[in-house]
Image (cartoon, coloured by chain):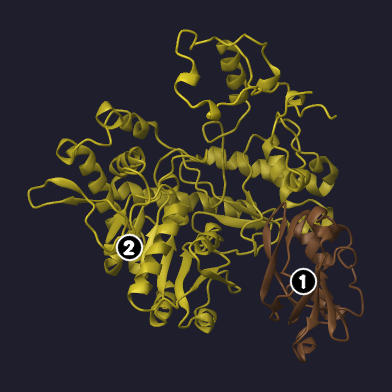
Amino acid sequence: MAQPQGLLFSKEHEWVSVDGDRATIGVTDYAQNSLGDIVYVELPKVGSTIAQFSNVGVIESVKAVSDLYTPMSGEVLETNGALENDPSAVNRDPYGAGWLFKLRLTGAGEASSLLSADEYEKIATE
Amino acid sequence: MQPPPSNSANGIPLIFELGQAGRATDYLEHAKPLESYLPAAALRSGLPLPDNSELDVVRHYTQLSHRTFGIDLGFYPLGSCTMKYNPRINDAIVARPEFADLHPYTPDELAQGALEAMYELERSLSSLFGMAAFSLNPSAGAHAELGALLIAKKHFKECGEAQRDTVIVPDTAHGTNPASATMCGFKVLTLRSDARGRVSPAELRRVLGPGTAVCMMTNPNTLGLFEDDIAEIASAVHDAGGLMYYDGANANAIMGYARPGDMGFDLMHLNTHKTFTIPHGGGGAGHGPLGVAPHLVEYLPVPVVTRDAHGRYALDFDRPKSIGPMRSFWSNFAHAVRALAYLYANGSDGLKRVSQLAVLNANYLRVKIAEFLATPYPERCRHEFVASAQRLKREHGVRALDLAKALLDHGFMAPTMYFPLLVPECLMIEPTETESKETLDAFIEALRAIVATAKENPDALLQAPVSTPVGRVDETTAARRPDLRWRPPP
């Protein structure tokens, strides 16, 4: 499946949509498909400051518990509270209603360490 | 109002749905009422307890027991869980009144035989695994992990190195390790294995430092591969001031061939059910001996069994540096007796043969299964190996889960699935030494037939299992909206 253009991707299968100094982060369609039915998402605390590629939460599926990493550094502005009652949104709509958290970006030049849609596509179909 | 959840779809009603008011035999009819023993405030009334005759209760649970599956009924190839058969003689020995009727408060001088059994087991384990001493105190493998990390913590505190707050856990280590480290207040650093499925000493050196407390490894690891750089890894961790911990989950592969103490490990545990003989699973009454290198002996949990120059055994509680007791009384003493009986019955040659056959059986399965399913690390394995259904998933929509469910229809327990996490659509298969070639062949042919069905008629597998008392369960709803409580109908 082709990845949405205009997003940046991490090797850990997160996507990030950057808008000025704001960013929205989620996991990719490949990630949700590999994980299987997601049953619980633990997100970083609003107001906390998180560093690029650090472990900021947990995604639990019927198969396994996996760590969640942030593709960029920043202050957590908002988390997707709807996932608490309905984590299946990550499976249904990973690039839309299944978004995970929003950041105010604090790192400079971090985008260069992320992948384009085409670069990520290669990893995901390997 | 929804009807109460019922098990009766499976042909067996819940115990709550059976019986009639007043049917239970009233054993306490002539006894004093409970109110005369307990304060009225502690009593509850109106509890919806089932009211069944003794015979109905016996029949109910006997019927349920006929619908379960275990090692006594069939092959149970659960990777990293070592579901070996427990010889019945070990249970018979511990049932002897000399062991079974011994009161825990019996003075040492009247319990010399029991203390000798504990001492003999402790010495045997130390010799077999190359450690200075073992504690028989922890009552499960993960309990021993916690004990070992408490020892590490105390050790570093006394050395003035309390800043060592990080436990390194490779992605091929046993699943309980990160949980034990977190429970003990350490930070967990996950280390990725290399292309050979092993810890790379160079990668490890990059993360070692003044914060390194312990590196927890499983060897052979959960891919069934021996960490052949273990000596270099251990010296790198020691050079950084850290300790090496050996998770004994896979010790069944190495008995008499390699010793964690010789590999450079400072701490280790064994799972008595995996490597020797005590009942598997059930969540109760486990046993996890905890071993240490010479410099950590004084931290072991109390009590420790000692033997003096006259051959007298005693329980020693006077160990000022000990982390303290991890269990009441003498822990699960009966399991220590079972383990000792197993060691005596096999002897050192027999234990080598156990590991030899466990490895042989795993390699036999690995080579045969590779004829029809990918094995991502196609080299000689130890006691277990991983296969991957990734290609089946991509090309036919059949996942590891579907293969596992289909195996149930063939009368086999499913292997461990989706672990270790680094192998997609993973099946981790461990046959153990106690299975015959005929059983292994039957398993291979069942899996071969399932994989053929996956390619020709994948939809047929998506419904599996169809011959078990309970078919495909909705694991997603069970995890998202667990409902575990029976409520009386309104």
Q: Residue at x 28, y 42 (%)?
A: B344
Q: In this view, does B228 lie to the left or right of B133?
A: right
Q: Which residue is drawn at 33% across and 28% down?
A: B95
Residue B22 pos. (x, y %): 63, 9
Label 2 element class: strand
Front-most of residues B33 and A124: B33
Question: Residue B195, relative to residue B90: is it above or below?
Answer: below
Chain whose colour in the figure is brown: A
Q: Residue A13 carries which label?
A: 1
What label does residue B149 carry, if any?
none
**Residue B138 image offset from top left, x and y in percent:** 39, 50
**Location of residue B14 (image quadrant):** top right
**Residue B362 visible in the displayed image:** yes
The residue beneath circle 2 is B292
Gap in angstroms between the C-alphas marked 1 and 2: 41 Å
Asked if labels 1 and 2 share a chain, the reply is no
Please name the amino acid that badge 2 sits on: Val
Residue A54, image quadrant: bottom right
- What's the colour of chain B in the image? yellow
Q: Is residue B380 visible?
A: no
Image quarter where the C terminus of chain A lies is bottom right
